[in-house]
Image: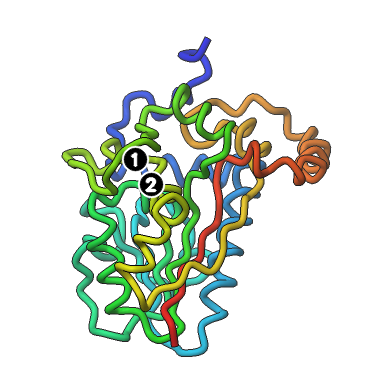
């Protein structure tokens, strides 16, 4: 059954390849429910960018499958994979001057960074005062833990002692529980390591629409005429997002 549900158009594509990312973008644009989820995420990221009192460069990390630049063309797109974005950039070694970045945006990217301490040192160095790291990440709700442990190929290791992990494959070597570990479980440690950075917001995002849309790895089996009904169900389920949400929006700001 699970094999049938997998999206056939990506079956023979190498995960993380230019062709894979192109197909991923096409799926987002073609699936109304999925596009609504991404539009919601991008609106949150852009709102964070606009909250910064100073101007600077806008950087997106892990842009391979992202459409954020369609919403805000000022973003510099980047990825660790060549040929999928404007620049090849390692988040652990940002090629920017001190106090030069207004915002760093990441959509499903933080949990792929093998050394987040190095990344946040770089963020602390390069952000302007009041600048933000704004991200959409895998949440740590009871349903998210179940879903990502059983129906997703990447690991979800919320009992790991360390934030870092070995990486040979930039897409598959990850820890989807990383944002919870860094910002919730080990928050005191984060605040000691990065005194100039403050964790400002956690907000759970719509999950039901994302789940039944198939995301970018499963088939979309929902007739489009049901979308208004599904949107209504999504609204009704808002109170239970702390139990069921799959993703959350996190904002970290550099102190002014």
Residue 125 sits in quarter? bottom left
Label 2: which residue?
Answer: 178
Q: Secondary structure at mark 2?
A: helix
Q: Is the C terminus in the top left, top right, bottom left or bottom right quadrant? A: bottom left
Q: CA distance from mark 2 to mark 1?
A: 6 Å
The answer to whether one can see residue 20 in this image is yes
Q: Nearer the viewer, residue 228 or 70?
A: 228
Residue drawn at x 79%, y 46% as measured from the top left: 235
- Against 186, residue 220 (above or below) is above
The answer to whether one can see residue 32 in this image is no
Instruction: Tell me, yes or no, whether the two marked residues, 2 and 1, touch with CB atoms within 8 Å.
Output: yes
Label 1: which residue?
Answer: 175
Q: Nearer the viewer, residue 162 or 13?
A: 162
Left or right of residue 119: residue 202: right
Residue drawn at x 41%, y 86% as measured from the top left: 129
User: How many neighbours does mark 2 have within 10 angstroms: few (below 14), some (14-19), or many (20 or more)?
Assistant: many
């Amino acid at each position: 059954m699970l094999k049938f549900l997998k999206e056939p158009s990506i079956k023979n594509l190498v995960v993380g390849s230019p062709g894979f990312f192109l197909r991923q973008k096409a799926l987002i644009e073609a699936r109304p429910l999925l596009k609504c989820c991404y539009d919601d995420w991008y609106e949150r990221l852009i709102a964070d960018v606009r909250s910064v009192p100073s101007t600077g460069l806008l950087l997106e990390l892990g842009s391979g499958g992202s459409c954020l630049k369609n919403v805000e063309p000022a973003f510099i797109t980047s990825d660790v994979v060549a040929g999928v974005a404007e620049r090849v950039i390692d988040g652990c070694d940002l090629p920017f001057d001190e106090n030069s970045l207004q915002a760093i945006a990441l959509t499903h990217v933080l949990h792929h960074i093998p050394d987040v301490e190095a990344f946040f040192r770089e963020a602390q160095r390069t952000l302007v005062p009041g600048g933000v790291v704004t991200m959409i990440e895998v949440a740590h709700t009871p349903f998210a833990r179940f879903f990502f442990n059983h129906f997703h190929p990447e690991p979800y290791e919320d009992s790991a002692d360390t934030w870092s992990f070995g990486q040979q494959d930039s897409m598959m070597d990850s820890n989807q529980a990383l944002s919870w570990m860094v910002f919730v479980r080990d928050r005191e440690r984060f605040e000691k390591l990065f005194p100039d950075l403050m964790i400002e917001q956690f907000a759970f995002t719509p999950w039901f629409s994302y789940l039944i849309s198939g995301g970018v790895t499963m088939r979309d089996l929902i007739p489009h005429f049901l979308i208004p009904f599904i949107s209504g169900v999504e609204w009704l389920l808002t109170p239970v997002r702390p139990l069921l949400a799959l993703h959350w929006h996190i904002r970290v700001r550099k102190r002014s």
